[in-house]
Image (spheres, rainbow, N blue to C red):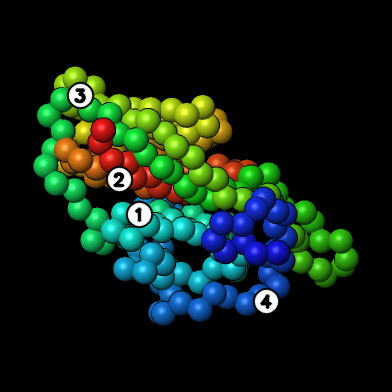
Amino acid sequence: MTLQGFAVPCALCFALCACSTMRDVAEPVALEDGFNTPASDGTFPIALTSIQRGSIPGQYAYQTGFEQDVGMRVFAGLMPDAVVSGSVGGSAIFDARYQGSRTSEIAITPATTPGGDPILTGTSGAFSGDITLTVDMAGTALTGSDGLLAVNGQIDGQTLAGTVTYRGLDGSLTGLIGEDEAIGAFFATSDTTIYAGGFAGKAR
């Protein structure tokens, strides 16, 4: 069962206290869930197992997984070299492609044997799709939906911020937007579901 990258949906199972093999990363650090700047190769400096991740060079990266003794973690951010040119001064349409990873039905199952470890379970998989994003006439909002992912962004110069909703769970959005390109990274967490991803689109 392969969870790294774009795996098909599958069941996750972790011993919360048992030893497990960590992903090799350079100098793991404490990161807060949410928006972080990835390394130039699209990775985040934290040791996780059962990783799902993705990145587009020069645009965005995201990563979800399990951290020993902590639980499920979620990270997303713009690549360090992400840039756009110009600005949108009025109405525009961007044809974008998005991708991400999601873990749902997260639950803790009590240990089945005396002295055993509780088990964290969930269902994980990758998602992707195409979405049309529209800038309003004032050039201050970027919105769109494909029925699964909805984007509701506010534009301030080249800065994009706001919210997304994927399969009913609201999340946070950060990004950049210019006259020719829109780039976004997003994430969400709840007691039972997490997701992270990004989108990039070109103006028509």
Location of residue 81 in the rendering, given as x and y in whole percent from the top left corner: 23, 61
Q: Residue at x 51, y 72 (%)?
A: 47
Residue that carries the numbered disc 2 in the rendered image? 183
Residue that carries the numbered disc 1 in the rendered image? 60
Q: CA distance from mark 1 to mark 2?
A: 7 Å
Q: CA distance from mark 1 to mark 3?
A: 24 Å
Looking at the rendered image, the disc whose residue lies closer to the viewer, 1 or 3, is 3
Residue that carries the numbered disc 4 in the rendered image? 19
Residue that carries the numbered disc 3 in the rendered image? 91
Residue type at tag 2 = Ile
Q: CA distance from mark 4 to mark 1?
A: 32 Å
Residue 53's place in the image compared with 179, above or below, is: below
Q: Residue at x 38, y 64 (%)?
A: 42
Depth order, front residue of 14/8: 8
Residue type at tag 1 = Tyr
Label pair 1/2, CB-CB below 8 angstroms: yes
Label 2's element?
A: strand
Quadrant where the N terminus lies?
Answer: bottom right
Depth order, front residue of 82/50: 82
Q: Is residue 85 left or right of residue 153?
A: left
Q: CA distance from mark 2 to mark 3?
A: 17 Å
